[in-house]
Amino acid sequence: QVQVVESGGGLVQAGGSLRLSCAASGRIFSPNFMSWYRQAPGKKREFVAIISNSGSTNYADSVKGRFTISRDNARNTVCLQMSSLKPEDTAVYYCNADYGDGANYWGQGTQVTVSS
């Protein structure tokens, strides 16, 4: 049984920083891709950032230069360092682990609230 668990959300003032973490467990091999998505109230879930098991990254335009994704393959963990946070970054942030064989798992989400 694969589990994906996020942590690190919270309340921060605009301009501040937060670090989200996510751990995937239950399979022998590391996920091919690990990514972060977010969903604000009344909006669709949107892509934030992704990292491959070789370290290649990609970001949504809205977070480029402010967010950094990193991973530890040995521990099957991924982090999202968020800086210069804006009120529009307020959302539930979800971690996704993609093993590349049709197996794709989501965490339960962690709330990030940025006050103005």
Image (cartoon, rainbow, N blue to C red):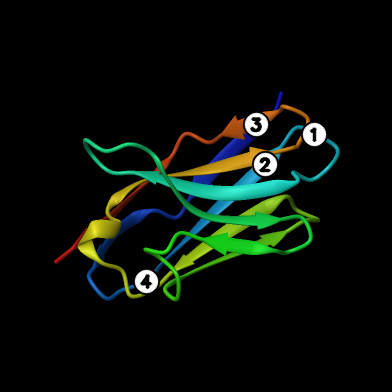
Q: Which residue is mark 1?
A: 27
**Would you identify the image quadrant in which residue 63 lies?**
bottom left
The CA span between labels 3 and 1 is 12 Å
Identity of the residue drawn at 37% across and 63% down = 62
Quadrant, the C terminus: bottom left
Above or below, 29 against 104 in this view is: below
The CA span between labels 4 and 3 is 29 Å
Quadrant, the N terminus: top right
The percent position of residue 111, horizontal first and vertical second, equals: 34, 46
| Mark 4 crowdedness (10 Å alpha carbons): few <14, some 14-19, many ≥20 | some
Going by the numbered disc 2, the residue's amino acid type is Ala
Q: Which residue is mark 3?
A: 104
User: Given contact means CB atoms under 8 Å apart, are the residues at marks 2 and 1 in contact?
Assistant: yes
The percent position of residue 109, horizontal first and vertical second, equals: 43, 39
Q: Is residue 105 left or right of residue 44?
A: right
Residue extending farthest right: 28
Identity of the residue drawn at 21% across and 61% down = 87
Going by the numbered disc 1, the residue's amino acid type is Arg
Q: Is residue 66 left or right of residue 44?
A: right
Q: Nearer the viewer, residue 26 or 116?
A: 116
Q: Which residue is mark 2?
A: 24
| Mark 2 crowdedness (10 Å alpha carbons): few <14, some 14-19, many ≥20 | many
SS label for mark 3: strand
The CA span between labels 2 and 4 is 24 Å
Q: Is residue 116 left or right of residue 74?
A: left
The percent position of residue 66, horizontal first and vertical second, equals: 42, 73
| Mark 1 crowdedness (10 Å alpha carbons): few <14, some 14-19, many ≥20 | few
Going by the numbered disc 3, the residue's amino acid type is Asn
Q: Which residue is mark 4?
A: 17
